[in-house]
Amino acid sequence: MSFPLRSASATVGGIFVFGRILDKIRLDAQGLLPAGYHVGIIPGKKTFDDRVCRFLGVDFESLRLRTLQGGSDEEILDWCFAQGQRPDDERIEVWNAFMQKRGWNDAATPGLTQQKADADLAHRDDIQTFFALFDAEEGRE
């Protein structure tokens, strides 16, 4: 069986991370979100879930409720565009590049280093971003 969350680099509407958040919402609602995974906003922290919602201009709780109503990923993304904002291709390109490199020589590097250690992957010098860490932890090397 493959890991139940898609890679952060999988796209919906060309946008990284969005589909992974939908997976987490759906799994959490079924009580199937793997241990150690968080869905939603953590007060005082900038999570990937939080960043996606701010990028699209939607509230996480509203996104959660809309996702649980059903529909395809693309329909849910279209709902986000209607409720919040529709970024143009250039903004999506910049967003994807930022997210794909998160943890690599930036303010999130200490957090990445700690999470690698927590996952017993501190020895893996090839893991330099959160996307790479997620893929390694989830067997998508």
Image: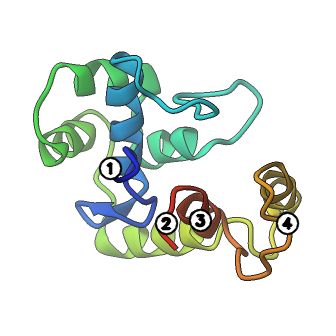
Does 45 sit left or right of 130 as displayed?
right
The crowd level at tag 1 (other Cα within 10 Å; few <14, some 14-19, many 20+) is few
Which type of secondary structure does the marked residue at label 2 adopt? helix
Which type of secondary structure does the marked residue at label 3 adopt? helix
Three-letter code for the amino acid on which mark 3 is drawn: Ala
Q: CA distance from mark 1 to mark 3?
A: 16 Å
Q: Is residue 18 above or below residue 60?
A: below
Task: In the displayed orientation, state which residue is furthest to the front.
Answer: 1
The mark that comes first in sequence, 4 or 2, is 2
The mark that comes first in sequence, 4 or 1, is 1
Mark on residue 136?
Answer: 3
Q: Label 1 belongs to which residue? A: 1
Mark on residue 122?
Answer: 4
Q: CA distance from mark 3 to mark 2?
A: 22 Å
Q: Nearer the viewer, residue 120 or 20?
A: 120
Q: Is residue 45 above or below residue 91?
A: above
Which type of secondary structure does the marked residue at label 1 adopt? loop
Q: Label 2 belongs to which residue? A: 95
Three-letter code for the amino acid on which mark 4 is drawn: Ala
Q: CA distance from mark 4 to mark 3?
A: 12 Å
Three-letter code for the amino acid on which mark 1 is drawn: Met
Q: CA distance from mark 2 to mark 1?
A: 31 Å
Q: Is residue 121 above or below residue 111?
A: below
The mark that comes first in sequence, 3 or 2, is 2
Does 67 sit left or right of 118 as displayed?
left
Residue 134 in percent (x, y) is at 58, 58
Q: Nearer the viewer, residue 39 or 84?
A: 39
Q: Are marks 3 and 2 in contact (CB under 8 Å)?
A: no
Three-letter code for the amino acid on which mark 2 is drawn: Trp
